[in-house]
Image (tube, rainbow, N blue to C red):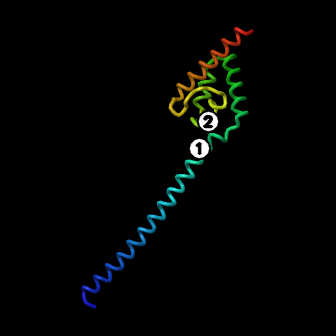
Amino acid sequence: MNEIEKVEKKLVQIVKLIAQIEKLVARANKELNALKKQSNKASQTSENTYSEEQLKKEYEELYNSFINGGIENITEFVKAKKKEYLKAFCKANDLPLNVKKASKEMVKKEIINWFMQRRAIQKKVI
């Protein structure tokens, strides 16, 4: 074999390796896309994993602690919870707040406002 044939043979091997790499990259991209879809589905369903009954019960407990002690419990509650939980909490308790766009501070203020309105309404009724 002369030098040119050796180089041609090496080039053929390199082309084959490049083709194999392209196949592996394509497969890796498919797997990555599948994982992204699964991750998105998991994050969408994570907000549904909270029991609406439990969220409403926690709302009532939080309201009672607000009546008895003030806003400190609300502050602690909001700081301790994740945004997904707060979103489910607001949705279950019909609090019209877009938690995705709102900061935790805004969520806290909105909950306090709702509790203050509820307390004022209850005082008028009683």
Q: Is residue 2 above or below residue 48?
A: below
Task: Residue type at mark 1: give it.
Answer: Gln
Task: Residue type at mark 2: give it.
Answer: Tyr
Q: Which residue is mark 1?
A: 44
Give the number of the mark in front: 2 or 1.
1
Tags 2 and 1 touching, CB below 8 Å: no
Instruction: Please name the residue shown 60% across and 47% down the image.
Output: 42
Give the percent coordinates (x, y) of residue 125.
Answer: 73, 10
Assign a secondary structure to mark 2: helix
| Mark 2 vs mark 1, CA separation in Å | 12 Å
Give the percent coordinates (x, y) of residue 37.
Answer: 54, 52
Give the percent coordinates (x, y) of residue 52.
Answer: 70, 34
Q: Residues within 10 Å of mark 2 (few under 14, many from 20)?
A: some
Residue lying farthest to the right in this orientation? 126
Of labels 2 and 1, earlier in sequence is: 1
Instruction: Please name the residue shown 39% across and 76% down the image.
Output: 16
Q: Is residue 33 above or below residue 89?
A: below
Assign a secondary structure to mark 1: helix
